Image (cartoon, rainbow, N blue to C red):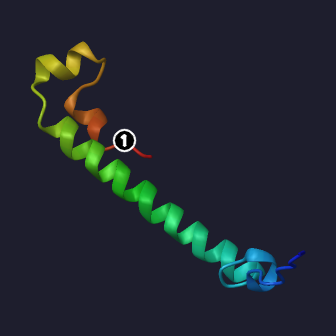
Amino acid sequence: MAAYGNTRPLDGGHLFGGRMNQIAFGLFGKIIAWNDARVTRKILSQLTDRELDDIGLNRGDIEHITA
């Protein structure tokens, strides 16, 4: 017996459809990148000056960390 499934996501699998999908994922990506940079800066700010020097950074470099 053969079966044919015709269920598929709407609009070719796009969440919101076309351009809205790109905007949504772009926004989510920016939020994730911002949070990653925030967490990294927080962790780096907890290191001692000696530890920062070991990885080639100083306190002034921390604020310029981006995703």
Q: Which residue is mark 1?
A: 65
- Pinpoint residue 27: horizontal percent, then vertical percent: 54, 71
- Pinpoint residue 39: horizontal percent, then vertical percent: 27, 49
- Relative placement, left or right, of 58 versus 67 is left
| Residue 2 against residue 66 in the figure, above or below | below
Image quadrant in which you'd find residue 8: bottom right
Q: Give me the residue at 59% from left, 67% from top.
A: 26
Q: Give me the residue at 89% from left, 75% from top.
A: 1
- Count the numbered circles shown: 1
Amino acid on which the number 1 mark rests in the picture: Ile
Image quadrant in which you'd find residue 64: top left
Q: Give me the residue at 20% from left, 32% from top.
A: 59
Helix, strand or loop under label 1: loop
| Residue 30 against residue 11 in the figure, above or below | above
- Pinpoint residue 12: horizontal percent, then vertical percent: 81, 77
Q: Give me the residue at 9% from left, 26% from top.
A: 48
| Residue 14 against residue 56 in the figure, above or below | below
Label 1: few (<14), some (14–19) or many (≥20) C-alpha neighbours in 10 Å: few
- Relative placement, left or right, of 14 versus 48 is right
- Relative placement, left or right, of 32 versus 7 is left
- Comparing 61 with 33, the one in front is 33
